[in-house]
Image (cartoon, rainbow, N blue to C red):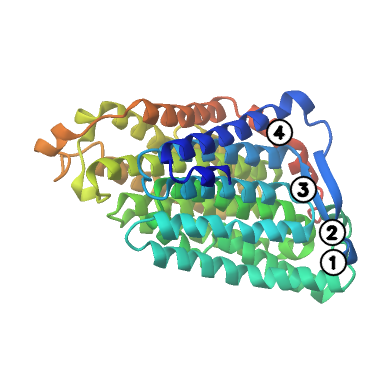
């Protein structure tokens, strides 16, 4: 909230909030050399929160949650730098909302008590609602309300499930629920309620329709955090809560859930091909990538599960970078229509080079992060769903088609209305701040693509523990 004290001085507010986010990032980076990950859970914090209901304030960090906390801290810093020129009104409030979004997402990744998890799960809607509704584009209020309604309606059945568990005297800590899963009709209802909430946030077909609108109308930093953080809370919640707590039911429903993920991959990929707005095209590509991740999760294969986690991180980096670069185009040309661009490589070579890099990374070029995740997913899921894995490969090929269309409509092809003539001469290439943002993302994409073992070592123990809950 420190940024709000400087609301009359936007420059100071930006600086204070950025400094706060940088300190958070440095603290997160300092965790591994200090503690390591020898045990199943590190850096735990636990005390009685609501003693009469046996609810505890319980936080804990393992390799999986650490990875996502680190990703969140990094993307919030980059989101602030991205917004340096874009957000000129109520700057202090906007940057404070970015910090609030980081805090609530970190709470989701660290919570080890179900009621505390639900508190952070719903709290993260508030800053994102205002980021979209106050600072977004022309249809921002519609998109913000749609996002909020979908998320709240999806989350209410989960709240009823949590209350039901508490009324039945169930210990709602993650450890207790994982050790002794709920039984009978209560397990069925809880599994359905939890998966509905997580499916909306991921998002999973057919409850995905809020995301393209939210992405399209959000400011650039909002789209970056939606793709890189908010969607990851849904996928993380499936791994951390749904699969351990309801192993039998979700094992029985796994083919159907994997099929929904596969359907989302194809539907979103084909829809992306038809988009004329560059940001909306990237938004549908985000739905497609999350569909592939869900397909891998419910293949119930350890290698495919590793691929899903790698893909979660890679999607945040590559798709987030594409949103940032489309935002840079809109900032210069006040348009996102593909028909207005083309041939930008000749007038903005630095922009064209970075755009090409992240586009081919998103398409799965070998040596870059998406390739590693997709390779693991294909090999792992083929052992369980050979036909589904073959179809998923075809869906990835469709993804290559919309990436090529995006490239053709921006940096390649013939110059459009805004990228040729006098408009092209007036266009400026990337400045130092923008080069810094994109370089950090590019280095992360290269690191995961060339040395994925760093990431896989972090998540090995949590994923092994998750696989131990699988029936059979």
Circle nearer the N terminus (3, 1): 1
Disc 2: CA contacts within 10 A as few (<14), some (14-19) or many (>=20):
some
Residue that carries the numbered disc 2 in the rendered image: 177
- Whichever of labels 2 and 1 marks the residue nearer the N terminus, that label is 2
Query: Furthest residue to the top?
Result: 33
Q: Is residue 386 visible?
A: no
User: Who's the residue at 34% across and 35% down the image?
Assistant: 355
Local crowd size for mark 3, using a 10 Å CA cut-off: few (<14), some (14–19), many (≥20) = some
Q: Quadrant of residue 168?
A: bottom right
| Residue at the (20%, 34%) spot, across then down | 427
* Mark 1 closeness class: few <14, some 14–19, many ≥20 residues within 10 Å: some
Local crowd size for mark 4, using a 10 Å CA cut-off: few (<14), some (14–19), many (≥20): some
With 155 as the anchor, is 62 left or right in this view?
right
**Which disc is residue 458 wearing?**
4
Return the mark for residue 67.
Answer: none
The residue at the point 78 percent across, 55 percent down is: 244
SS for dot 2: helix
Q: What element carries label 4?
A: helix
Task: Report the residue marked by disc 1.
Answer: 182
Residue 88's place in the image compared with 179, above or below, is above
* Real-space CA distance between mark 1 and mark 4, rounded to the nearest whole angstrom: 29 Å
Compared across the picture, whether 130 is left or right of 432 comes to right
The answer to which of marks 3 and 2 sits earlier in the sequence is 2
Disc 3 target residue: 466
Q: Are marks 2 and 1 in contact (CB under 8 Å)?
A: yes
* Label whose residue precedes the other's in the sequence (4 or 3): 4
**How far across and down, in percent of the image, does residue 178 sit?**
83, 55
Q: In this view, does 46 lie above or below 448?
A: below
Mark 3 → mark 1, Cα distance in angstroms:
17 Å
């Amino acid at each position: 909230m420190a940024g709000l004290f400087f609301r009359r001085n936007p420059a100071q507010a930006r600086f204070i909030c950025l400094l706060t986010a940088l300190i958070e990032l440095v603290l997160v980076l300092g965790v591994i050399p200090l503690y390591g990950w020898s045990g199943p859970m590190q850096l735990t914090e636990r005390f009685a929160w609501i003693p009469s209901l046996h609810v505890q304030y319980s936080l804990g960090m393992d390799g999986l949650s650490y990875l996502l906390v680190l990703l969140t801290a990094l993307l919030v810093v980059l989101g602030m730098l991205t917004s340096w020129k874009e957000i000129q009104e109520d700057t202090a409030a906007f940057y404070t909302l970015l910090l609030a979004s980081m805090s609530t997402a970190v709470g989701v990744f660290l919570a080890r008590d179900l009621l505390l998890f639900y508190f952070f799960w719903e709290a993260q809607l508030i800053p994102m609602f205002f980021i979209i509704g106050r600072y977004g584009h022309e249809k921002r209020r519609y998109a913000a309300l749609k996002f909020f309604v979908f998320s709240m309606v999806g989350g209410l059945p989960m709240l009823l499930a949590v209350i039901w568990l508490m009324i039945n005297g169930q210990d709602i800590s993650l450890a207790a629920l994982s050790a002794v899963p709920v039984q009978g009709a209560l397990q069925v209802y809880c599994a359905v309620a939890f998966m509905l909430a997580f499916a909306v946030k991921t998002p999973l077909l057919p409850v995905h329709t809020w995301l393209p609108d939210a992405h399209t109308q959000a400011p650039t930093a909002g789209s970056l955090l939606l793709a890189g953080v908010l969607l990851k809370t849904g996928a993380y919640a499936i791994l951390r809560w749904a699969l351990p707590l309801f192993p039998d039911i979700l094992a029985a429903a796994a083919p159907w859930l994997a099929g929904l993920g596969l359907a989302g991959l194809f539907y979103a990929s084909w829809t992306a091909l038809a988009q004329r707005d560059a940001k909306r095209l990237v938004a549908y590509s985000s739905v497609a990538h999350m569909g592939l991740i869900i397909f891998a999760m419910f293949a119930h294969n350890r290698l495919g599960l590793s691929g899903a986690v790698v893909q979660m991180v890679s999607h945040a980096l590559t798709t987030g970078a594409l949103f940032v670069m489309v935002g840079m185009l809109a900032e210069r040309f006040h348009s996102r229509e593909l028909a207005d661009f083309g041939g930008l490589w000749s007038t903005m070579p630095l922009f064209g080079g970075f755009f090409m890099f992240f586009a081919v990374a998103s398409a799965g070029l070998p040596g870059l992060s998406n390739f590693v995740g997709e390779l693991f997913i294909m090999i792992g899921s083929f052992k369980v769903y050979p036909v589904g894995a073959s179809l998923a490969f075809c869906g990835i090929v469709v993804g290559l088609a919309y990436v090529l269309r995006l490239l053709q409509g921006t940096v390649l092809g013939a110059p459009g209305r805004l990228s040729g003539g006098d408009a092209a001469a007036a266009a400026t290439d990337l400045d130092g701040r923008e080069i810094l943002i994109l370089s950090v993302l590019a280095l992360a994409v290269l690191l995961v693509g060339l040395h994925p073992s760093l990431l896989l070592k972090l998540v090995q123990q949590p994923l092994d523990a998750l696989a131990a809950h699988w029936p059979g």
